[in-house]
């Protein structure tokens, strides 16, 4: 569910606006840490932590995107890569606040208006609700005149500019919404797992999320959900094959890689997608 | 915006060079408030560069662009478009995957539905959208593409795509239209259709500036001709006065 949320959030950026970001895990981390610290250090409630993580992600994303989105798309990818690395370093080394590699333990389970979210079923309900919310946001945004401009930016930014659209503004807003949804997922993740450390928010995670969007199909309604489902269930399915774990883990990486290559060659639009990368 | 309704577009001492090649040198133009102006000249004369500078897609190395009293130099392209100066591109720029209607809708100005909160909560967006839809359908009919509203733009013929870019341009409600080769490479019947549209727009009080190589088309519709060569304006005036001068013919042939 967390991955579904992340995939949907990245799809707004990559699928609909044509901006590939490799920093989605960084925003997941920003959200998870903000929420965890607000709750464990300041004793705030889960709802405050969740809102705080969204506010934090939006502020950080705007600070990153306003200068970097002035660049061409390829350089933007590199900048999101740099940002991803910076977040990783901050989480590891700013030990006074983030406790570095030791991570943050004992993150309490969420309480929302008296509802104690404790069992797996409770979490499933909460995660489903938040995923639906993320889905609703992306669906409403992309189906509106706002989304029309995002699609135009993906297809031909000059065309949008020539017709009076401030494309920088649209890209910054899309990036911020995408970051906010990722942070929301991060907050949920932190309170579900109850212990977070920097290893959960590395570039590898970002790439996994990108794979979900690409395999599922960028810019489509169900694509990111399908992609998330396939890539989350794949390792479980492999377990049943009965390989020793040492081989299984490596095999998984090989299968991810081959799957991506196969998708790019035979169906660049993804399983459900309408548009492909690399026109 | 209304204050600038009859403002003239002009530029002063524009200079621009690419890798040492002077694309514009000291170009001074004052365009009329309405009518049809043709810009002609051999390849590499700086016609498209001039258009790119006037619309903010290129920043000039020296000189200024004005719309009435207002300086446009250095403004981003989308701001200039909103001030009522729209353009088309030589290489057709359209969103070819989506319908004609969506292309024209995109170009409509001041849409509330383009703000994030409006997109999420949809206050009054439906009403605005249906009004814009009507306007878009009207424009598609105006350029003679009625019945094709829901077809993907990429399926149109080359000439039809040129008509569509014109419709998108008009959808911005700009009063000044800068068209980069609107009839080049188009079937002769379609040429006369497009030229007729340009006349209609002039009669509505718009200023139409177009770049063209076909002198026959220029003679037919232009009220004023600007001749460029090697980044300079070498002549301007009424078509029949300018086009018969020997040095102009020579610049073209030689």
Image (cartoon, coloured by chain):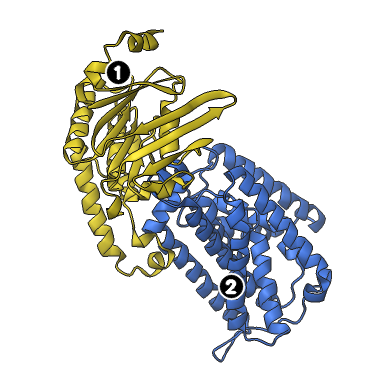
Chain colours: A blue, B yellow
Q: How many marks?
A: 2
Q: Is residue B40 above or below residue A120?
A: above
**Same subunit, tags 2 and 1:** no
Pointer 1 local density, CA inside 10 Å: few below 14, some 14–19, many at least 20: few
Q: Is residue A216 above or below residue B140?
A: below
Q: Residue at x 23, y 26 (%)?
A: B222
Quadrant housing the N terminus of chain A: bottom right
Residue nearest the observer in this picture, A140 or B188: B188
Answer with the quarter of the image where residue A206 lies.
Answer: bottom right
Q: Residue at x 29, y 37 (%)?
A: B166
Q: Position of residue A136 (x, y in %)?
A: 44, 67
Extreme residue in the bottom direction: A114
The residue where tag 1 is placed is B214
Left or right of A104: which side holds A260?
left
Q: Residue at x 32, y 8 (%)?
A: B246
Is residue B146 in view?
no
Q: Position of residue A153 (x, y in %)?
A: 46, 47
Answer with the quarter of the image where residue A83 lies.
Answer: bottom right
Residue nearest the observer in this picture, B213 or B119: B213
Left or right of A66: which side holds A245?
right
**Mark 2: secondary structure:** helix
Distance from label 2 to label 1 (Cα)? 58 Å
Q: Position of residue A219 (x, y in %)?
A: 48, 52
Which chain letter matches label 2? A
The residue where tag 2 is placed is A55
Residue nearest the observer in this picture, A1 or A96: A96
Q: Position of residue B175 (x, y in %)?
A: 27, 44
Which chain letter matches label 1? B
Left or right of A269: which side holds B238?
left
């Amino acid at each position: 569910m967390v991955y579904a949320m992340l995939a949907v959030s990245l799809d707004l950026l990559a699928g609909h606006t044509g901006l590939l970001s490799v920093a989605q895990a960084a925003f997941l981390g920003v959200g998870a840490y903000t929420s965890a610290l607000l709750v464990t250090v300041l004793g705030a409630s889960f709802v405050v932590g969740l809102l705080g993580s969204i506010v934090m992600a939006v502020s950080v994303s705007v600070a990153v995107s306003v200068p970097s989105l002035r660049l061409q798309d390829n350089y933007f990818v590199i900048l999101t890569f740099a940002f991803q690395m910076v977040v990783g370093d901050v989480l590891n080394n700013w030990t006074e606040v983030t406790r570095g590699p030791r991570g943050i333990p004992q993150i309490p389970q969420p309480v929302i208006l008296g509802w104690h979210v404790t069992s797996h079923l409770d979490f499933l309900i909460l995660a489903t609700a938040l995923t639906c919310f993320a889905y609703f946001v992306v669906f409403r945004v992309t189906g509106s005149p706002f989304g029309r401009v995002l699609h135009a930016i993906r297809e031909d930014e000059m065309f949008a500019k020539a017709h009076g659209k401030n494309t920088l503004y649209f890209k910054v807003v899309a990036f911020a919404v995408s970051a906010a949804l990722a942070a929301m997922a991060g907050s949920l993740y932190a309170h579900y797992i109850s212990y977070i450390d920097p290893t959960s928010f590395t570039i590898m995670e970002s790439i996994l999320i990108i794979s979900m969007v690409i395999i599922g199909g960028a810019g489509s309604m169900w694509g990111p959900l399908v992609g998330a489902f396939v890539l989350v269930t794949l390792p479980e399915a492999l377990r049943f094959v009965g390989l020793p774990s040492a081989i299984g883990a490596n095999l998984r990486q090989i299968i991810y890689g081959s799957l991506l290559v196969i998708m790019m060659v035979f169906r660049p639009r993804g399983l459900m997608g309408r548009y492909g990368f690399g026109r | 915006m209304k204050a600038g309704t009859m403002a003239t577009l002009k530029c002063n001492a524009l200079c621009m060079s690419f890798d040492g090649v002077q694309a514009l040198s000291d170009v001074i133009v004052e365009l009329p408030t309405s009518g049809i102006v043709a810009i002609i000249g051999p390849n590499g004369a700086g016609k498209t560069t001039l258009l790119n500078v006037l619309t903010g897609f290129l920043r000039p190395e020296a000189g200024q662009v004005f719309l009435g009293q207002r300086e446009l130099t250095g403004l981003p392209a989308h701001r200039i478009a909103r001030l009522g100066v729209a353009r088309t591109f030589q290489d057709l720029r359209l969103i070819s995957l989506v319908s004609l209607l969506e292309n024209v809708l995109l170009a409509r100005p001041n849409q509330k539905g383009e703000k994030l909160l409006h997109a999420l909560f949809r206050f009054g967006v439906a009403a605005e959208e249906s009004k814009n839809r009507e306007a878009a359908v009207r424009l598609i009919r105006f350029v003679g593409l009625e019945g094709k509203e829901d077809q993907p733009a990429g399926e149109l013929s080359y000439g039809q795509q040129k008509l569509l870019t014109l419709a998108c341009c008009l959808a911005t409600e700009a009063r000044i239209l800068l068209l980069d080769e609107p009839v080049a490479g188009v079937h002769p019947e379609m040429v006369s259709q497009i030229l007729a549209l340009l006349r209609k727009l002039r009669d509505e009080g718009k200023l139409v500036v177009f770049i063209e190589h076909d002198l026959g088309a220029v003679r037919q519709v232009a009220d004023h001709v600007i001749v460029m060569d090697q980044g300079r304006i070498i002549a301007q005036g009424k078509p029949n006065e300018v086009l018969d001068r020997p040095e102009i013919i020579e610049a073209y042939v030689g």
